[in-house]
Amino acid sequence: MGSTEPRIHTPLLTGPSKSQEVADLAEKIGLPLIPWQRWVLDDLLTVDDAGMWRKKTALVLVARQNGKTHLARMLILSHLFLWGSKNVLGMSSNRNMALDTFRQVAYTIQDNEFLLKQIRQIRLANGQESITLNNGARYEIAAATRDAPRGKTADFLYIDELREWTPEAYTAALPVTRARPAAMTLMTSNAGDGFSTVLNDLVERCKSYPPDNLGYYEYSAPQHCKVHDRKAWAMANPALGHLITEETLEESVNTNSIEATRTEMLCQWVDSAVSPWVYGSIEACSDSTLEIPVGPMTIMAFDIAPTRRSGALIMGQMKDGKIAVGLAQLWHSDIAIDEIKMSSDINEWAKKYHPHIICFDKYATQSIATRLEQSGWRMQDVSGQAFYQACSDLSDAMANGRMVHSGQADLVQHLNNCAAKTSDAGWRIIRRKSAGDVTAAISLAMVVSQLTRPQQTAQIFV
């Protein structure tokens, strides 16, 4: 059976709760709560002596297909039909998802006469979906954009798929409950990635001495558990034994990538949802004692992010039959890195190591390459088809243990951030879908590709 209590949650409140009212309504409409939903509501719906919500905002993290939409549906119905809320607003990163929840609420009302007789109008017209009660209460939906919630006020705000929300949309949505002293906000999501800025920031606040009016309920598996650990399945899937079975979870593990399984089924944060690396190869190639000394033939490569806010320089050498690599330097700026300063820094590294060649992508860093070439260094463009080959060379070297790195945290993070794009030319690291900065990984691919080629040795003929 799935775990009723979340693995991580904020301190529980004591006192009266309105959860029984929701449970009774759920039974009456033939859609009873399952244990984990009741557990969350027992704490979330705690009220003070004046009957006001003690939890004003709550975030529920749970794997997919575990009933979080039903939890939201019951709260929407309760606010409309039990607690006299005048305005209910549902929002999601994708309007179709908000529409799905809306339709479930509408169909539930239509299937229950005691609810339907309290309805003035249900509008299902595209873009104008709303439910209006005889007393004037109203439920509507909006897209997660910076403009959609403006001018709206809500007693209950439901935010779905928080992992996909932009900071601008989130900032615009929150004020809709400020004018209502008895308002409540419920947010639900699956685990996020490095780009889930809104979710990541909120989770961090929830885990760092949150206020009493903020509730956090995380149903997830331990971060480093095995994907076949059935105890971990139960932690992340509280509906196990109620809505889903072990057989369906086992099928999911067997048919999905490890990254997808950890995100979708185990509710774990992964650095990239479509990692191109063989699972475990990054760790297997690590050697904390590795050094990149001055003297041996060295290949360098550098890259800059499209935002121009970050850049990286990687060096590599052949050592004991393996490609030894290291991150020489990272550059960061809140606005844009100084390319002249970066050129100067790379030039200083080159003076120290005297690289055989310095690799770059002409579409991203041509201006820096031109400056370095004017300083006398031999430059090598690795873009287009050559970069597809470089990525394949890097993946193959990692999978077969032909590359070794010292385990530098920034380098490992850049590798973990990588996502792949496949075409008839092969595959390459793609920035847009990656989970964060990948400039070091892109530079690394260039270096490894050059060192994968047969190396020439000097010969003397007599």
Image (cartoon, rainbow, N blue to C red):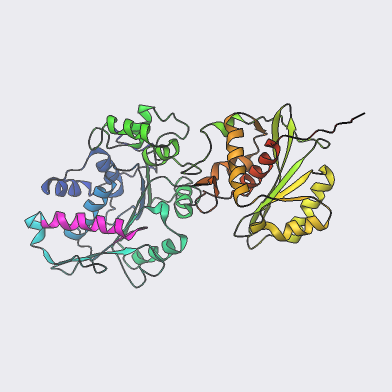
Instruction: Between residue 44 and residue 129, name the one nearer to us.
Output: 129
Asked if one can make out residue 163 in the rendered structure from this viewpoint, the answer is yes
Which residue is rendered at x = 26% and y = 59% of the image? 99
As drawn, 311 above or below 281: below
Instruction: Between residue 294 and residue 172, name the one nearer to us.
Output: 294
> Residue 155 occupies which quadrant of the picture?
bottom left
**Residue that lies at the very extreme toward the right in this rendered image:** 462
Which residue is rendered at x = 11% and y = 48% of the image? 28
Is the stretch drawn in magenta largely helix, strand or loop? helix
Which residue is rendered at x = 52% and y = 40% of the image? 276
> Residue 247 occupies which quadrant of the picture?
top left
Part of the protein shown in magenta:
90-110
- Where residue 40 appears, x then y in whole percent? 29, 44
Residue 339 magenta-drawn?
no
Instruction: Between residue 378 and residue 211, name the one nearer to us.
Output: 378
- Where residue 158 appears, x then y in whole percent? 31, 57
Asked if one can make out residue 51 in the rendered structure from this viewpoint, the answer is no
Classify residue 374 as left or right of residue 324. Answer: right
- Where residue 93 appears, x then y in whole percent? 37, 58
Classify residue 126 as left or right of residue 304. Answer: left
> Residue 243 occupies which quadrant of the picture?
top left
